[in-house]
Image (tube, rainbow, N blue to C red):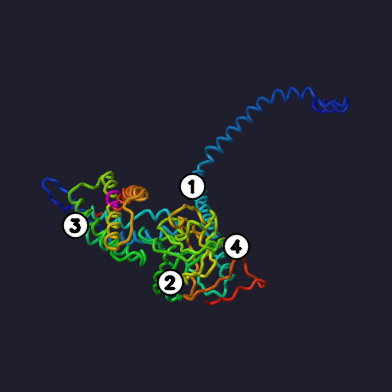
Amino acid sequence: MNDAFDIRGESHIEVHKFRTGAIVIATLLALVIQTSSPVHFSKLAILDLPLLVTIYFGLSRRNPSTGLLLGMAIGLLQDSLSGPTVPLGLYGIAKTIIGYLASSIGARLDTEHPAARFALTAGFFVAQQGLLTLTRRILLAQPESWLNMHLVVAALVNAFVGVFLFLLLDRLRRN
Amino acid sequence: MLQVLLLAVQIKRDSQGRLIRVWTVGAVSPFERAGSSGFGWVRETWRHYFALQNTTRDNEQLRRENDALKMQITQLQGKAAESDRLAALLSFRRSNADVPMIAARVIGASAGAASLTIQLDRGERDGIRKNMGVITPDGVVGKVVESYPNASQVLLLTDKDSGVGAMLADSRIQSPVGGQGEPLLVMKYVPNDDDVKLGEKVITSGMDRIFPRDLPVGIVAEIKSGNPFKQIRIKPAANLERLEEVLILLSLRPLEMKNEENTGDPQPPATGAANPPPAVKPR
């Protein structure tokens, strides 16, 4: 049922529910596409579909616990598919925090408008890169640059793709 | 009676009755012209209107057929390209028949930008072990960093944690070459005094004990002075962004491969009875 409402002061923000298995299938699909598409289209490696899925379900479910757990699961799966040079937990930590932040923001703001989604996705992408760099520098003692042009372009591309992907994922909502 | 008379006149005078014909033709031709135009109009109307009843359907069918043919052409082009690549792999495999290696298909890439890896469809069951070298006929690709029962992960040469023992083909200056997480590699320890030329080939030195000597690594793409070492950037010989099939060197012992005359040439020579493959020499 999608009639559940959270009441924060005077504002009513809808908590969206999804069809059975939608979150699991969308997550697995995102991971499969993420790993298989760059083999044939190397430019697609710029996309971070697991991040987009984390953001979307975080913003839609609006439950920080769910967002946190989903982010953690997606991040750990991404870690395990990235090879042994990526320690388990690198993406896990980043996506746990992103999932939490997305659901917390989703619970306070209306995030249905494409412009809001674009801005939030770009912001979360940069935040994730910041978290990855921070983890690498502090916990792994690995040199890592903070900001470069590629990151800015990747953030914009992911935000752009995110707007359309989110529209697609909206169809999975239970009406 | 009149017509018989007319015939008689024509025969007698050798006349063809031209005047009558002129009158007749002159009188009838406007009607003929009008009739022809009318029939033409009817025919054109028929062809362009009534007979076009099925054209939309035919057009759709033709368009579908066209799309199907285009798709078929694309598939055939893909298969032709795949066939070329496999032929190159086979040729390379034959030219180094004594070097144990196995072909594998690339089935995946890294799930994030934090590492540059690929996933292969061969694993422990095929004899793949950690630290085995991965190449293509064009050059070095990387090394196996993890082996699972039916798959394995390969760290590409361009990854930040990757490296290969290499040397400059002309000057024989040895130095490791490593990745930076970017398309170009770096050659790290070449002193400023040494002479390096742009476009010079870089080959494996065999010092890493993973790759045999003389495999193409890349070519020098950029040289800058540094202190105390030059900053040399290398363009990888293998197209690491478009890998579909690779060869895994099935040995953890140092191997020696056939020394190609053209170490940077991606096309391996075809083998034949007159050109037997060399023996493997464990060092």
- Kind of element beneath mark 2: loop
- Please give the label number shown on residue A64: 3
Instruction: Tell me the amino acid under the disc marked 4.
Output: Asn
What chain does mark 1 sit on? Answer: B
- Kind of element beneath mark 3: helix
- Please give the label number shown on residue A23: none
Q: Position of residue B109 (x, y in %)?
A: 40, 62
Q: Nearer the viewer, mark 3 or mark 1?
A: 3
| Figure quadrant of residue A142 | bottom left
- Residue that mark 4 sits on: B262
- Kind of element beneath mark 1: helix
- Residue that mark 2 sits on: B131
| Residue B171 part of the magenta-drawn span | no
- Residue that mark 1 sits on: B60
Q: Does the magenta stretch mainly form a helix, a strand or a loop?
A: helix
Instruction: Tell me the amino acid under the disc marked 1.
Output: Glu
Q: Position of residue B9 (x, y in %)?
A: 85, 25
What chain does mark 3 sit on? Answer: A
Residue located farthest toward the right when viewing the structure as drawn: B12
